[in-house]
Image (cartoon, rainbow, N blue to C red):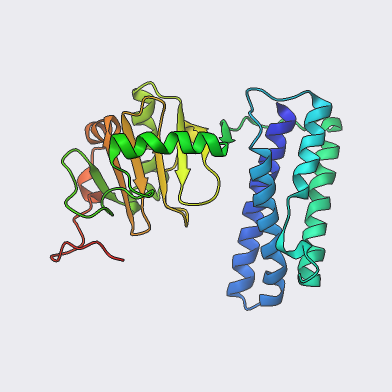
Amino acid sequence: MSLHCATRRYLIDRYDVLTRQYAERVHGDANPEAKRICPRYNLVADILDQVERLDPDNLPGMESLTGVLLRAAEVEQPSDSSAGDDSEGRAVQDERERYRSMVRALPSCPDSRTSPLGYRRVLTTEESSAWRLPLRRRWGVEDGIWHPMLAGPVPTGVLVLADAAVMHTEGVEVVRRALRGMGRQRVVELREYGADYLLDVEMFSPRYSGAEGLWTDAHEDWLAYASHEGTVAFGGALADAIEAHWPDLDRWRWHGWGHLGTVPH
């Protein structure tokens, strides 16, 4: 568990470092260097996706786990093809070896234990499909879209906020606290594209990430939805809990698309 956790921590931290470096280079007009950083952070994100397909509650033995973690670096990248840019290919191979060296060194490192990370596991394709079906039946989700992006008025009982409400730690913690008060421990996250997850409440952030998101749990008595139009909506038991425990909630309420009342395209 320590090895798996430390590997996840390394990848999460490494991704943060690389994306910050990329932003600095782009803004500083160092575009050739930024071009070499981009494939690095894409690789790190893809390796993390592979690593988080393992269930932290049911990990294999140390030797088998080490093999799985090392093989995660082999995830295919665009620069692996012969048509790929040479400098990008070298950057990807260097990043792969950096990761492999870290994995090999961790078991013998006295300080390899790291602070625990919340549970997060990538769902299988079958699991994702099974979770999406009741969202259509129970909540009226259409092709991954929910209120206020559906045609027609927002139903009573659906709480729609400006996404700025959850773009700061305090807002996200109010939502997590509401779920903990309901006795909930794990949440399902379903994205417009990319990986879907089962994760601890402590890792739940109902935010637009470049991909729209839907969230619920095994009780299916609540739903959250983050849209690309700057809204985050809550329904069911979670909406009620948020209304009851967010003192300045009114400042974040969404007030519609304007006097025309149309959904933007």
Number of numbered discs overlaid on the protein picture = 0
Q: Is residue 68 left or right of residue 181?
A: right
Q: Is residue 218 above or below residue 132?
A: above
Residue 83: percent from the left, percent from the top?
77, 71
Looking at the figure, which quarter contains the N terminus?
top right
Residue 192: percent from the left, percent from the top?
46, 51
In the picture as drawn, the residue positioned furthest to the bottom comes out as 29
Foreground pick, 14 / 94: 94
Foreground pick, 124 / 211: 124
Q: Is residue 242 left or right of residue 3?
A: left
In the picture as drawn, the residue positioned furthest to the left comes out as 259
Looking at the figure, which quarter contains the C terminus?
bottom left
Foreground pick, 70 / 133: 133
Residue at image position (20%, 63%) is 262
Foreground pick, 164 / 231: 231
Q: Is residue 215 above or below residue 226?
A: above
Residue 111 appears in the picture as rendered: no
Residue at image position (66%, 57%) is 42
Image-quadrant location for residue 53: top right
Q: Is residue 163 left or right of residue 56?
A: left
Residue 195: percent from the left, percent from the top?
55, 45
Residue 41: percent from the left, percent from the top?
67, 57
Image-quadrant location for residue 8: top right
Residue 250 appears in the picture as rendered: yes
